[in-house]
Image: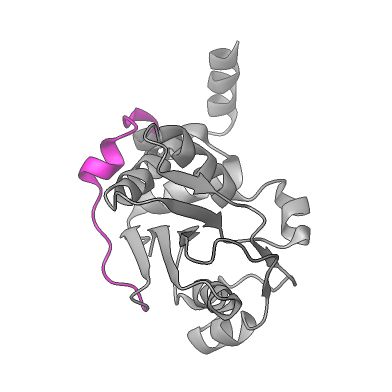
């Protein structure tokens, strides 16, 4: 029944070449073969793949707007392999979205990614915390803003909800970083709260 429904949807809304390619990939294909991203604007942010790559752009879109489970698994596996290479206990936190954005979309795509990363973690070196950092206010979408507007737009939008285990290593997970301003604002709030070991990892840049 699921396959029949999928065929029907494909007939009505033909998938792009990039979407068909993603469907054909094994879960580890992206990690093993994906083009690597260059350096980000901040040393604490690591991105795995270049967003300008059409496959990566489609992958992000499939995760963000269609909750595509295979796309989530492919991206999450690549993130997991990068995290596991550190061989240390890590707390993963999603970049928070506002309550308004959650109502509109129904989910935070970075939480879906972290959920899948945790499933890959058979060694139990990773844990998640979705309540540590919260978004205090909604902002306009950053897509069409220039660098200075993005930086100004992200000021004072996050709050640390509580403090515990301040010595834990924290990795903020997001799908895409552009200027890094939103991730920097999130990290700055955690630093102000007393956390000292904070990095960020994204699928694309």
Rendered position, 116 above or below 90: above
| Residue lying farthest to the top in this orientation | 1
Position in image of residue 143 (x %, y %): 56, 70
Seen at 64% across and 66% down, the residue is: 163
Left or right of residue 96: residue 136: right
Left or right of residue 67: residue 79: left
Q: Quadrant of residue 98?
A: bottom right
Rendered position, 130 above or below 176: above
How many labels sit on residues?
Answer: 0
Which stretch is magenta? Answer: 23-41
Seen at 70% across and 73% down, the residue is: 139
Position in image of residue 198 (x %, y %): 44, 68
* Residue 117 drawn in magenta: no
Seen at 59% across and 29% down, the residue is: 12
Left or right of residue 185: residue 59: left
From the image, give the main secondary structure of the stretch colored magenta. Answer: loop
* Residue 25 drawn in magenta: yes
The way the protein has been coloured in the rendering is one colour
Q: Is residue 185 visible?
A: yes
Quarter placement of the C terminus: bottom left
Position in image of residue 78 (x %, y %): 33, 45
Seen at 61% across and 79% down, the residue is: 154
Q: Is residue 72 visible?
A: no
Left or right of residue 41: residue 64: right
Quarter placement of the N terminus: top right
Q: Quadrant of residue 6?
A: top right
Between 159 and 182, the one nearer to me in the picture = 159
Position in image of residue 72 (x %, y %): 47, 40
Between 33 and 192, the one nearer to me in the picture = 192
């Amino acid at each position: 029944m699921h396959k029949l429904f999928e065929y029907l949807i494909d007939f009505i809304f033909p998938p792009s070449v990039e979407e068909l390619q993603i469907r054909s990939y094994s879960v580890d294909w992206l990690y093993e073969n994906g083009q690597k991203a260059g350096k980000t604007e901040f040393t604490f942010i690591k991105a795995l793949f270049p967003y300008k790559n059409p496959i990566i752009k489609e992958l992000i879109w499939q995760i963000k707007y269609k909750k595509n489970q295979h796309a989530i698994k492919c991206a999450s596996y690549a993130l997991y392999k990068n995290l596991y290479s550190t061989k240390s206990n890590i707390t993963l936190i999603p970049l928070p979205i506002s309550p308004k954005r959650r109502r509109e979309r129904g989910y935070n795509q970075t939480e879906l990614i972290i959920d899948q990363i945790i499933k890959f973690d058979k060694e139990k070196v990773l844990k998640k915390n979705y309540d540590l950092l919260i978004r205090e206010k909604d902002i306009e979408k950053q897509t069409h803003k220039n660098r200075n507007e993005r930086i100004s737009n992200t000021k004072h939008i996050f709050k640390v909800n509580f403090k515990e285990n301040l010595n834990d290593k924290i990795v903020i997970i997001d799908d895409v970083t552009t200027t890094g301003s939103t991730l920097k604002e999130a990290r700055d709030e955690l630093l102000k709260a007393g956390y000292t070991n904070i990095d960020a990892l994204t699928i694309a840049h």
